[in-house]
Amino acid sequence: MSVSYRQPGVVLTDRAFTVPLDHDDPAGETIELYAREVVASDKADRDLPWLLYLQGGPGFGADRFVGKQAWLGRALDGYRVLLLDQRGTGRSTPATRQTLPLRGGPAEQADYLTRFRADSIVRDCEAIRPRVTGGAPWTVLGQSFGGFCTVAYLSTRPEGLATALITGGLPALDAHADDVYRAAYPRIERKVTAHYARYPEDVERARRIAEHLLAHEVTLPNGYRLTVEAFQSLGIMLGAGDGSHRLHYLLEGAFVRTPAGRELSDAFQEQVQGLLSYAGHPLYALVHEAIYGQDRRPTAWSAERVRAGFERFDAAEALAGDAPLLFTGESVHPWMFECDPALRPLRETAELLAARTDWRPLYDRARLAANDVPAAAAVYHDDMYVDTAHALDTARAIRGLRTWVTDEFEHDGVRAGGPRVLDRLLALARDEV
């Protein structure tokens, strides 16, 4: 039974759907999906077209907006919006250290999680679309991994789409995870270099923190073991528009004087554990590299292996000389399943996923080359999370897709730019600019 309630300027309705775990076995096991319908209060009784929002990740539920925040206000001018918690996230049969043991042991858990990639998410969308729109195609807005899902949608179920809008989420169609990370590490280094140019005092601050972690075992209040590699992974913040500034504020308050000498402050540790913990989104760590699996090659901890070829990211080497410590970015590593208490019980499951070779193709180049769905994509000029060259190659492969390449925003541009980003994409898709 649907429940509706109000926030400033909007009416919200909770929606629940039952879909097959494996869409190739529609009579088999099912899972539950949750979505939040949003409509402007003054349009609640109107017959409006639908816009489906697919969140980035993988592993994050849809944004929990209050009222008409970010891009949502602009969307509500002309649409009824569905904010979907993709399978395994938010309230959609969540996949966590607490719930996955219901599947059985690590082998059963890994088999289960193979069905949590873009192909299954697209089929979920198509399963619920008739129940939401009455069968009419809808506009899809895909952010980051949600954009990967949107390209998979164009590849496999384009009849369900009225318009495809993508922000920071054009995937490499054929690249292995190794190709993705070989392109990523130089990009991450540029972001770190730009951060240190903005805040030169952070060079020494980062080195002091890393030296402290090499000399001391630090366990955060939530049980997370803070190693140098874990500290370096805070560089993921640099992919957001305000990330450099937030990282600076974090570093400047790292140490306090105590009777026992200089220690990492409680405030610093509290912030760091919130930034590093995967307790709220463990699926991200489990399937992050699997979203690139297509060619019967294992991903095999790609980010960790590729990093070994970029020696400047080696903290010990940097500290032995006078080089700045390089932060890392959006990548998942095996040590995370040892440091993070939310991931430790899932280490063997993650190993099995990293070894799998039976990934099915996610994208269809021939279908994309014949695309007739109006489509537009925002490509951020030096996006830390999605390689610009890969994104533009994919844009050229999708017939009729129009791009807006901009350095005005970082990867979170649809949130930071809000109505302006969505306006631009809608105009491009409608051929109005």
Image (cartoon, rainbow, N blue to C red):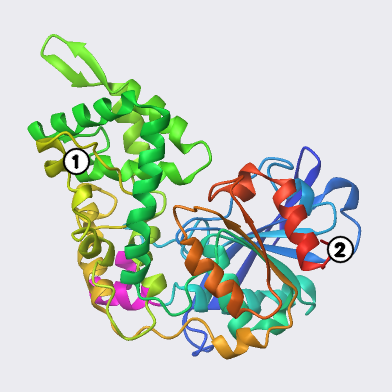
Residue at point 20%, 37% (across, down) = 323
Which image quarter holds the N terminus?
Answer: bottom right
- What residue is at 44 percent from the left and 52 percent from the top? 384
Image quarter for residue 183?
bottom left
Instruction: Give the residue drawn at x 36%, y 41%.
Output: 192
Q: Residue at x 46, y 61 (%)?
A: 387
Q: Is residue 302 visible?
A: yes
Q: How many marks?
A: 2
**Which numbered disc, 1 or 2, marks the residue that appears first in the sequence?**
2
Q: Which amino acid, mark 2?
A: Leu
What x and y, as percent, mark residue 324?
Answer: 24, 36
Q: Which residues are magenta?
A: 100-114
Classify 10 Å Cα crowding around label 1: few (below 14), some (14-19), many (20 and above): some
Query: Which residue is identified by label 1?
Result: 228
x and y percent of residue 386 in the render? 47, 60
Between the residue at mark 1 and the residue at mark 2, the CA separation in whole angstroms equals 52 Å
Q: Position of residue 5 (x, y in %)?
A: 74, 46
* Quadrant in the rendering for residue 65: top right
Instruction: Determine the secondary structure under disc 2.
Output: loop
Residue 240 has which mark? none
Q: Is residue 322 left or right of residue 30?
A: left
- Determine if residue 278 is in view: no
Q: Amino acid at mark 1?
A: Val
Q: Are marks 1 and 2 in contact (CB under 8 Å)?
A: no
> Camera-side residue: 95 or 335?
335
Mark 1 vs mark 2: in front: 1
What is the quadrant of the C terminus in the image?
A: bottom right
Q: Can you identify the residue that label 2 sits on?
A: 48
Q: Is residue 179 left or right of residue 172?
A: left
Q: Is residue 393 magenta?
A: no
Q: Secondary structure at mark 1?
A: helix
